[in-house]
Image (tube, rainbow, N blue to C red):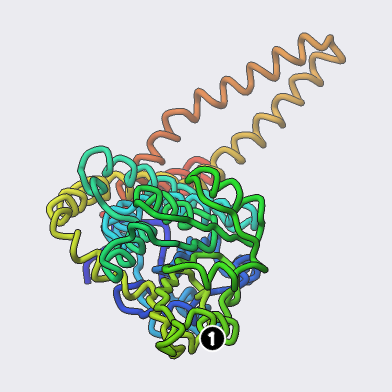
Amino acid sequence: MTHDPLLAPVAIAGITHHTAAVDELERFRFPDEEAFLAKARDRFRGVTLLQTCNRVEVLVHGEAAHLASLLQEEGREAFSLDTGTDALRHLLELACGVDSMIVGEDQILGQLKKSLTIAQECGTASPILELCVNKAIHVGVEVRRRTQINRGAVSIGSAAVTLAEEELGTLRGKHILVIGSGEIGMLVAQALAAKDLTAIYVANRTYERAEILAHKIDGKAVRMNDLPRYLALSDVVISCTSAPHPVIRTDELAQVMKARCWPLDGHPRPLIVIDIAQPRDVEEGAERIDGVRLFTIDSLRRINEMTMSTRRSEAEKARDYIEQELGQFIRLLNGKAADDTLAILHTWAESIRIRERDRALARLGAGDPRTKEVVEDLTRVLVNKILADVTVSVRMCAEEGDLKSAESLVSAITRGDKLCFPNEE
């Protein structure tokens, strides 16, 4: 078994589009993120939850076995689990877009930032975890600067538009309804704005947000209670809300399709519905309604394959850079892992400083405030200068994966223990 050089226990577990279909991803999701983080807070020094339309992954500063146990307790099965250096590599590949369904897409960077922000608000972002996510984001940005992995790469939103165009042959003169004005909705709308459409409708739970997006793309804002009317008018519906429940009900859609019937044919005009929300926006069973052609995130895999060939070599360049950065990533985390050991050293030194400062001030008498200030500054400077070199030494030992030597050095200083290095054991 190969020794992992990473000192801090880090693990990441979950499921992704590589092995899970959209319904499996939906079942694996945690609808109440804050409740999940609150439960995990008692077991790990740090934890973040990343949930996108293509993945659900939990990153922890803690033991992998405890993470596996937690997920199993929550009824989640068949998840992947990476630990140590493998977990760091996976995190970097994720941030760089190498592991995305749409290789090179940029949205993952914002999604990682959001997951860290939520963890910070819930009190589950340890310094190690913050360093992990921020380093991954930094490498992700740098990979996009150094390579062309996102040059011409489609997003989930633009892939949905490409799929609609393929199904209809052209979007020229068509009516399109976009439901949801978040990040993915914006990407969908931007991709549609480049097409020669007759009309773009934008619906959102908050009408004001629908108005903002509609104004940007010269479209029309729609209230959610008017959805049936605009479903009947549209050729394509692309839905991407963050609602925890379906926004397009099967019974309502069935009524809409009846209103789309040709006078003499008896069959409704076809309606292409592309549901790229997670959890899904379209109620189960909608695909069985006459005239409805329903597509999900799973349908976008083919779009990625069509464009992947042009980005495969860039993805390899990204992987090479990731391997180069991995060593520095480990050194950063290992150096951070020395914080607890250094805290012992500095707490010991501070207690001595305060004791001797107070003794000196007592011998000097009441004195004036200026004398107290000088003694305070002098003792602080002396302690900082005395500890400067040993602090560097402890940090360097940790960065090289040798925390035992760092701990032995601190014990020798603070408790008078014998120095003990690994090669002496």
The front one of 327 and 284 is 284
The front one of 331 and 184 is 184
What residue is rendered at 59% in x and 87% in y?
251
Q: Is residue 128 visible?
A: no
Q: Which residue is mark 1?
A: 254
- Return the residue found at the far right: 366
Q: Is residue 44 visible?
A: yes
> In the image, is 352 to the left or to the right of 284?
right
Quadrant where the C terminus lies? bottom left
Q: Quadrant of residue 270?
A: bottom left
**Residue 107 at x, y percent in the picture:** 40, 53
The front one of 45 and 158 is 158
The front one of 117 and 404 is 117
Q: Is residue 8 above or below residue 138?
A: below
Q: Quadrant of residue 223?
A: bottom right
What residue is rendered at 56% in x and 54% in y?
125
Amino acid carrying mark 1 in the image: Ala
Helix, strand or loop at label 1? It is helix
What residue is rendered at 72% in x and 31% in y?
355
**Residue 229 at x, y percent in the picture:** 59, 70
Q: Is residue 161 above or below residue 190?
A: below
> In the image, is 328 to the left or to the right of 276?
left
**Residue 192 at x, y percent in the picture:** 39, 53
Q: Is residue 215 above or below residue 245?
A: above
What residue is rendered at 44% in x and 90% in y?
266
* Mark 1 Cα-neighbour bin, 10 Å: few <14, some 14–19, many ≥20: some
